[in-house]
Amino acid sequence: MAKSFGIAGRKRSMKNPSLTIGTIILSFIVAIAIFGPYLPFVDEDLTEHLYLKYEDGTMVTPPFSPSEEFLLGSDRQGVDLLSRLVIGTRETLLIIFSVVIIRLLLGAFLGIGAFYSRLLKVVLQVWHQLFSYIPSIFLLVMIVGIPFFLYSSNRPFWFILVLALIEVGRVGDVIFKYVSDIAGKPYYEAGIVAGGSPFRLSRRYLYPNMKPQLITLIANELGRTLFLIAQLGIVGIFISVAFENDASGAIYAVNTSDSWPLVLSTILKDMWGVKIIPFSAIFLISITVLSFYLIGNGLVKKTNKN
């Protein structure tokens, strides 16, 4: 009996390969975020090596090539690249999930609220139009460069909040269109005639019929946010920075973030030399986005079957 149950379970999982494969990939990435820093081959301190000296007396400066000590090589600061990526996994996931949760909660409030309230509809329209004509990365660069955000001790919080808010109007507009489409269906109109309250109508008609679209929206937003912070890394904008003085007394910003986009900050140099540095981060970002897509696609498939 137990054997037949196991076979049935495998058959069910094979009917939804997107969900199975996506869950395996994302579970592995989450496991790296939780347990990765404690693995024996990971340098939790991200030690910088100014040079390596070989037995024949040869001295090599970073970035170092892959070796027994540096499995993927090192970055330009002499930090073990594999350790850098493993340590940065937790921060990267925390950023994108925090941004998407805030964005979806506010977007859902505005999108659904705009259907019932004329005031919220105006707020949503203004919000959406205000941030829809300028690429998000340009807006972020301008906003986080304002002294209040740049020098704030709570910069990571403001960074995540700004990253979420500039896209709230777009998400709210998408949800508003979902609601408007469902509200035009005969079953929704029948619910209104029967005296259903907005809350009851939302619970009975809106959420069940919006579930596939919301799943797809969440998966897209996770991937979109990850790609956006990767772009920010390329232009040298990070979630946290510290300020130091150089020999002349001038103040300059030093990145203190460990997220994956940090590895892309030298991509213009590395693309023509040490390709493993940017490609390693690009690979991790790509498979993470792929896992979001596969899980979203699998959940939609499962929801439609139910």
Image: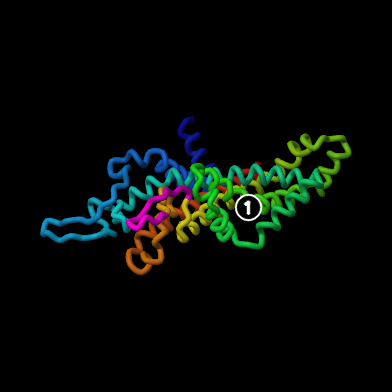
User: Does residue 304 show up magenta in the picture?
Assistant: no
Mark 1 neighbour density, 10 Å: few (under 14) some (14–19) many (20 or more):
many
The relative height of residue 305 versus residue 137 in the rendered view (above or below) is: above
What range of the chain is rendered magenta?
Answer: 239-252
How many numbered marks appear?
A: 1
Q: Nearer the viewer, residue 12 or 115?
A: 115
Residue 30 seen in render: yes
For the residue marked with disc 1, what is the amino acid? Glu
| 242 in the magenta segment | yes
Single out the residue that lies furthest toward the top: 1
Q: Pick the residue in front: 19 or 269.
A: 269
Q: Quadrant of the C terminus?
A: top right
Instruction: Answer whether residue 16 is visible to the viewer in this image.
Output: no
Q: Position of residue 39 (x, y in %)?
A: 32, 40
- The location of residue 216, given as percent across then percent down, is 62, 50
Residue at the location (70% across, 53% down)?
127
Q: To which residue does mark 1 refer?
A: 167
